[in-house]
Amino acid sequence: MYKRLFISTLIVLFFGSVSLLASGEQSSVDSIKTEVVEEFTIAKDDPIVAMLDSLALLTVFRNIEKRKENVENLSNFPPGFVPEYSDSVYNERFKELNAYSTIEFVYNPYVKTFINLYANRRRDLTERVMGLGQLYYPLFEEQLDKYNLPLELKYLAVIESALNPVARSRVGATGLWQFMYGTGKMYGLQVNTMVDDRSDIYKSTIAACEHFVDLYKIYNDWNLVLCAYNAGPGNVNRAIRRAGGVRDFWAIRHFLPRETQNYVPAFMAVTYVMENAHAHNLYPNPPIYSHFDVDTLKVTQQLSLRTVSEFLDIPLDHLNYLNPTFRQNIIPYNARNPYYLRLPRDYTGLFIANADTIYNHRTPQQIRQEEMAGQMAETTIHVVRSGEVLGSIARQHGTSVSEIQRLNNIRGTLIRPGQRLVVRAPARPVTQLASNTNTHVVRSGETLGVIASRYRITVRDIQHWNNISGTTIHPGQNLVVRRPKGMEQATASEPETDTTVKEELKYIYYTVQQGDTLYDIAEKFEHISLEELKEINDLSADSGLNPGQKIKITVETLEN
């Protein structure tokens, strides 16, 4: 409702302030389009150039020399040759552009300057843009066609972001289509701490198409639509009024913001260069992943991109390039509004086959974060009283001066009354675990419940001894465990310990998780068969399992 009211208001304001062109004025406009400009240079801080230069930092492109050896040289130019053409040749090529487009393309010195930028000064970066286009243009064209829009509008994203999916302008515009926060919200793009839909390739492209449709309803002229996309309808309407009501970009150009003055010429130049790339000896430098190399998977739980990177051995910056929507390297889970992971197609099978492990896996960094969270849970705030020093406060709380200094980022020993200090009591001394303490190395398929049953202790004991706040563990992790009294005599050597456990404990119990089957459980433990599981638990092949149900696992089998 808000968007429709906004567009309707703009239409009324526009037509209420714009007068009709006289025939004499039209000839003046035509002369402006082809006027001779003695000297026109692009400012060093031009945002269009800045976006193009940002591609130099992307690390997702193939080996350039190998790529150049394999491309088909359509114009038979020698490698590295930069062709130059006369104005008459450019004029003929622009006539060809206009013959197949509803957008009016004009060749003049402004446009020529940007042709020089893309075809000469930034050739390598232009070839990167061409490579990225192989990934994004198919999606752009599909949506533009759906909304019955000129397909050449796909090149506007080159001006906006240079097709850099992680692009962000100095004023906060974000994504391939560079939506500002307010405009993005108006077209349904969600922005929060975890997710920025302005960087979502699909959602932002749909929003851009809807925005094009709305702007064309106001101006009925594609070059003015481009101006309004960049500067906003308010600036365009003011420029039209100052130009005496003339509705033509070239007539109002000098009344527009400086950035917008270059915006349409740059778009015309990019469209020309992309459509005539081979004539300038330009060939795509494709990214590692093309449009058909990428697959999309629905996320069924919260997922860490760092974990995916570690488990599948894909560089994290490659995952960020494919999934720029997620601001904290975390894909949240929302049943009503699902999110998707974009992966190289070659890795989707590996991800699907190991989805449970990947979803539940924790990286060393995540483990440290959980440990820190567990430590902070034991902290308290001490308000310094008159006469107190760090030494007395440390003794009072059973900690050390250095620990207080570390927790509070204090370098010296000077404190003042009323100051609030974070203090933390030390963990239970290791001497409490003494001779009945052992280290258990987690094996594949083990849970805290399985380990607790094996040692006749509780999950909470293991969590406390190892400063673990949750129940997730990973293979290879070392856990401190303390055997109960009666088992302490078996601590002289590891073989004796194993023998004692075997004699005193014939079975341990596995707690069934949601979705578990007998086959799944048999797979979790080495050297145990499905038939053995059914036999010792008196179950048949058709027996259903319920979450929380206890399943016997023989200790002998577990420890072989």
Image: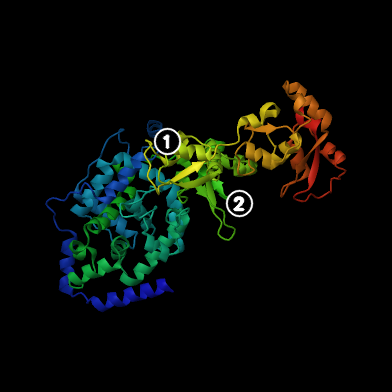
The amino acid beneath tag 1 is Arg
Marker disc for residue 266:
none
From the viewer's perspective, is 80 left or right of 145?
A: left
Q: Position of residue 363 (x, y in %)?
A: 55, 38
What residue appears at the point 13 percent right and 55 percent down from the top-left corner?
36
The amino acid beneath tag 2 is Thr
Q: Which residue is mark 2?
A: 300
What residue appears at the point 80 percent right and 27 percent down from the top-left corner?
500
- Label 1 or label 2, whichever lies nearer to me, is 2
Q: Is residue 148 visible?
A: no
Q: Position of residue 173 (x, y in %)?
A: 35, 55
Q: Which residue is mark 1?
A: 62
First reached walking from the N terminus: tag 1 or tag 2: 1
User: Cα distance, mark 1 to mark 2?
Assistant: 32 Å
User: In this picture, is 432 found above or below 189?
Assistant: above
Q: For mark 2, give the secondary structure.
A: loop
Query: Which image quarter holds the N terminus?
Result: bottom left
Q: Position of residue 302 (x, y in %)?
A: 57, 50
The foreground one among 393 and 492 is: 393
